[in-house]
Image (cartoon, helix red, strand yellow):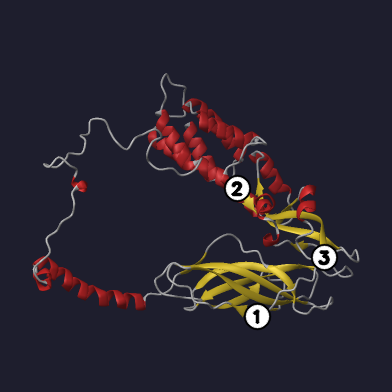
Amino acid sequence: MTLLEQIRTEAVGNDTDLAVILRKCRVLAQRLENEEFKKWVDFELGGYPANDAVPKYRVLDCFCYGKFRHMSNGSESGSIQIPISTIPQQYRKTLFTMPFSDGVSVLQNLVNRTTNENIQTGWEADFCGLVGRGIFPNWELLSAWRLYPAVRVVGLLDSVRNRILNFVLEIEKENPNAGEAIMTSAPIPSRRIEQIFHTHIAGHVGNMAVGSHLSSPGLPEPRTSSAGVQPSERPSQQKLPASRWEWFLKPSRLVFVFLTALLVPIAAIYFQSTEPDLIKVGGVPVPKSGRVDPSTNSARLLLEVDVPIKNRSVKSGHIERVEIRPARFDQPVEVEVRYVDRRPIGWLETKSLKFQFVQTVRHTGADSFIATFFDNNGKQIYEETLGGYVWTEGQPAPPNVTIPPAD
């Protein structure tokens, strides 16, 4: 079995450790004499330098939670989700994304040691002081942390494995024996290896090679007209017909008028019969939470979420209804849909639609549900897990955020 066949077989399955596959890729990079591939393999094995940017597939979006203290009476809250909209713009990318610079073995060990569905990393202390008093009125931030699903890290590792597989398949197609012995000449032209690397590992690029030109030597220059000027430089002086009817009576123009009269009604019927095509765009919506009743003992929470929806069809559409189901089978859900934004969305238009839910809390800890959004034709558009972190019994209530009812 050749080296390329070994890497291909092990990358397809999940039995071989990713670090072992990368070490074989290191041997392949040496035999291909490609420095970019060699450098990428070394970084994936040993980690990326602290001051260097990591590839986009190694940056994950996350949610942020924190504990707060009331600035008047000193009472402290439980863990509360921090809305991204309350954080200054210049800090959002730093706080709500998590770059992973460690090698694949460290990331695999992180996943193996995680006993929960989510992985938690704390904020730097300086950020708590910078933004801590602007999140909720009269409350200051004591501590905060990022929370992201462990399955996202598994997806990151799978992304590395898939990039290796795609790269090896293309190299094997060029030369099945490219990874065998060190040859006197390169098994594949270096420029072709660079194209494969940038397409399947570093990111998608066009088919044009680096340094190529749009013009080729030996092609003749554009010819001038008999008058000695370029055709585009001639003034347009078309002779007008003697009468308006003469313009319509020419055969080619009669065909144009006939086709226009035929196609316009067909187009009108098509636009009336087509259906709206609504899709959710943008990142993960960040819900805001508050209470329906301003009483500190209220067990009814109000969640508000803004969802950007785009219409890709020529026919207008809107979100008609939202359905609720439990996030876990062992968890009852008591949620009512309070408001659905049914504003129409026109052709190629994007609108941020507002939805509100009233959730009755029966226990402490995480309490979540799944909201499914449907358009006016009953088609499912989007699905999102919502809910809140409920304060612990005996502890002070979370910040009393006031969310007005939507119109």
Dot 1: element: strand
Question: 157 or 309, which is in the foreground?
Answer: 309
223 on left or right of 43: left
The tag on residue 191 is none
Counting from the top left corner in percent of width and height, residue 197 is at 47, 37
Q: Mark 1 vs mark 2: which is more N-terminal?
A: 2
Dot 3: element: loop
Which residue carries the number 3 mark? Answer: 138
Which residue lies most toward the right here? 73
The tag on residue 156 is 2
**What residue do we see at 86% from left, 70% from top?**
393
Q: CA distance from mark 1 to mark 2?
A: 38 Å
As drawn, 349 above or below 293: above
Q: Are marks 3 and 1 in contact (CB under 8 Å)?
A: no
As drawn, 151 above or below 185: below
Which residue carries the number 1 mark? Answer: 338
Counting from the top left corner in percent of width and height, residue 165 is at 49, 42
Q: Amino acid at mark 1?
A: Arg
Categorize mark 2 by other alpha carbons within 10 Å: few (<14), some (14-19), many (20+).
some
Q: Amino acid at mark 3?
A: Asn
Depth check, mark 1 against mark 2: the one in front is 1
Q: Are marks 2 and 3 in contact (CB under 8 Å)?
A: no
258 on left or right of 38: left
**What residue do we see at 39% from left, 28% from top?**
189
Q: CA distance from mark 2 to mark 3?
A: 40 Å
